[in-house]
Image (cartoon, grey):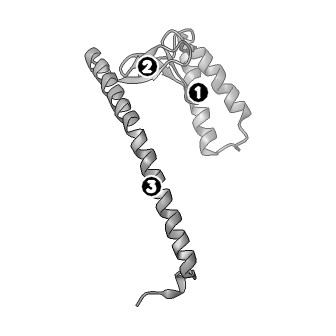
Amino acid sequence: MADTETAPKITDQERQQLQEQLEALGKAGAAISAAMAPFRKALAEIEGLSAALLERFGGELAATCEGCSKILFFGELGHRCGDGPTLCDACAPTVADCHRQAVEILEAMAEPPGDEDRKEQEERVAALASRVLAGEGEQKAVYAL
């Protein structure tokens, strides 16, 4: 047996008004959907053209350089910053730049010693410091995207 306690308490007049309003909204939604159909079709065609262009050059887009707006493909050298931006090899920071930034982040961290995030940042600083000490400080900090 159904639980009638959860059914709304509604008069016949309210039910009729609700039904009319819902039908009107449904018709408005259908009209908007029909009006949008040509735009959806155009977007699908644009996506197809974009895919065909990429296929022609045999690459898959990885990102766009935040520094110079150059498109970057997977497999090319670049730098993906920890806070999100991706840079091409020309715009990428040096290893020494990355080390300086990692030290600044570590010094600004409020987390106590032993915290997992702090440990990860300390490891990042140590790894970059060893690269700087190995003479790699002025090399670009790039890797295959």
Q: Residue at x 58, y 82 (%)?
A: 9
Disc marking residue 33: none
Q: Position of residue 12 (x, y in %)?
A: 53, 81
Three-letter code for the amino acid on which mark 1 is drawn: Ala
Q: Earlier in the sequence, mark 1 or mark 2?
A: 1
Q: Mark 3, mark 1: which one is toward the viewer?
A: 3
Q: Secondary structure at mark 2?
A: strand
> SS of the residue at dot 3?
helix
CA gap between label 2 and label 3 equals: 54 Å
Residue 44 sits above or below residue 79 on the image = below
Q: Are marks 2 and 3 in contact (CB under 8 Å)?
A: no
| Rendered residue at 43%/87% (across/down) | 2
Check the image and report above or below for 1 versus 80: below
Where does residue 54 sit, x and y in percent of width and height? 31, 20
Q: Which mark is residue 27?
A: 3
- Which one is in front in this view, the residue at disc 1 or the one at disc 2? 2
Which one is in front, 34 or 99? 34
User: Total marks drawn?
Assistant: 3
User: Disc 1 and disc 2: Cα gap in Å?
Assistant: 19 Å
The x and y percentages for residue 141 are: 51, 16
Residue located beneath label 1 in the image: 126
Identify which amino acid the numbered label 3 is placed on.
Answer: Lys
As measured in the structure, the alpha-carbon distance from the residue carrying label 3 to the one carrying label 1 is 63 Å
Pick the front one: 124 or 89: 89
Numbered circle sitting on residue 143: 2
Q: Position of residue 23 (x, y in %)?
A: 46, 62
